[in-house]
Image: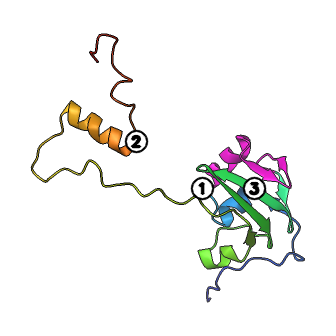
Amino acid sequence: MTSQPAKATDPAESGSVRVDAWIWSVRLTKTRSAAATACRGGHVRVNGDRVKPAYAVKAGDEVRLRQDGRDRVVVVKKIIRKRVGAPVAVECYVDNSPPPPPREAVAPAGIRDRGAGRPTKRDRRTMEQLRGLALPPEAGRAPDGRR
């Protein structure tokens, strides 16, 4: 018995599949439970409507998935029931997602010399301020100037 590579079904061949299973199968989420949780949380829309995990998705449907602060917009080309390799999964949808926002170039602020020891509280606050993670030094002070 020889094993054959996994293939997606043609749109004309099958009717529909659960939206959470399809999202997981085409590798938009890492697990099926994550896909179901996204559906229950209102982060998945099919043709503009919020859907439950059991919603039946068909070829031609537009699926919008909000994930990690980014919108993924895909149009279903082929119905797929089981998780397959990435090259096969990409053939199952058309990706109309906007490009991801550019990563901000983070300056190498706060890099300490090896052996310099643990940073003091003052050093840590300075590093956080340079990275843009902390409030300005005046914001955290009491009216008399103490922290």
Q: Position of residue 132 (x, y in %)?
A: 40, 41
Task: Assess disc 2: are there few (<14), some (14-19) or many (≥20) residues with their C-alpha within 10 Å of its C-alpha.
Answer: few
Q: Does 84 appear above or below 68?
A: below
Which residue is depicted at the point 66% across and 60% down? 24
Q: Is residue 22 visible?
A: yes
Q: Is residue 85 visible?
A: no
Q: Earlier in the sequence, mark 2 or mark 3?
A: 3
Question: In terms of depth relative to the viewer, which is nearer, 5 or 73?
Answer: 73
Q: Residue furthest top?
A: 144
Which quadrant of the structure image shows residue 86? bottom right
Q: Is there CB contact under 8 Å for labels 1 and 3?
A: no
The residue where tag 1 is placed is: 31
**Which disc, if any, is residue 20?**
none
Task: Assess disc 1: are there few (<14), some (14-19) or many (≥20) residues with their C-alpha within 10 Å of its C-alpha.
Answer: some
Answer whether residue 4 is magenta in the image: no
Q: Position of residue 70 (x, y in %)?
A: 63, 53
- Of tags 1 and 3, which is closer to the observer? 3
The residue where tag 3 is placed is: 64
Between the residue at mark 1 and the residue at mark 3, the CA separation in whole angstroms equals 17 Å
Question: In terms of depth relative to the viewer, which is nearer, 64 or 91?
Answer: 64
- Left or right of 10 on screen, residue 141: left
Question: In terms of depth relative to the viewer, which is nearer, 90 or 68?
Answer: 68
- Left or right of 19 on screen, residue 117: left
The residue where tag 2 is placed is: 132
Question: In terms of depth relative to the viewer, which is nearer, 128 or 48?
Answer: 128
Q: Which residues are magenta?
A: 30-54
Tell me the element at label 3: strand
Q: Position of residue 58 (x, y in %)?
A: 86, 64
Q: Earlier in the sequence, mark 1 or mark 2?
A: 1
Which residue is depicted at the point 11% across and 47% down? 116
Which residue is depicted at the point 60% across and 56% down? 31
Answer whether residue 53 is magenta in the image: yes
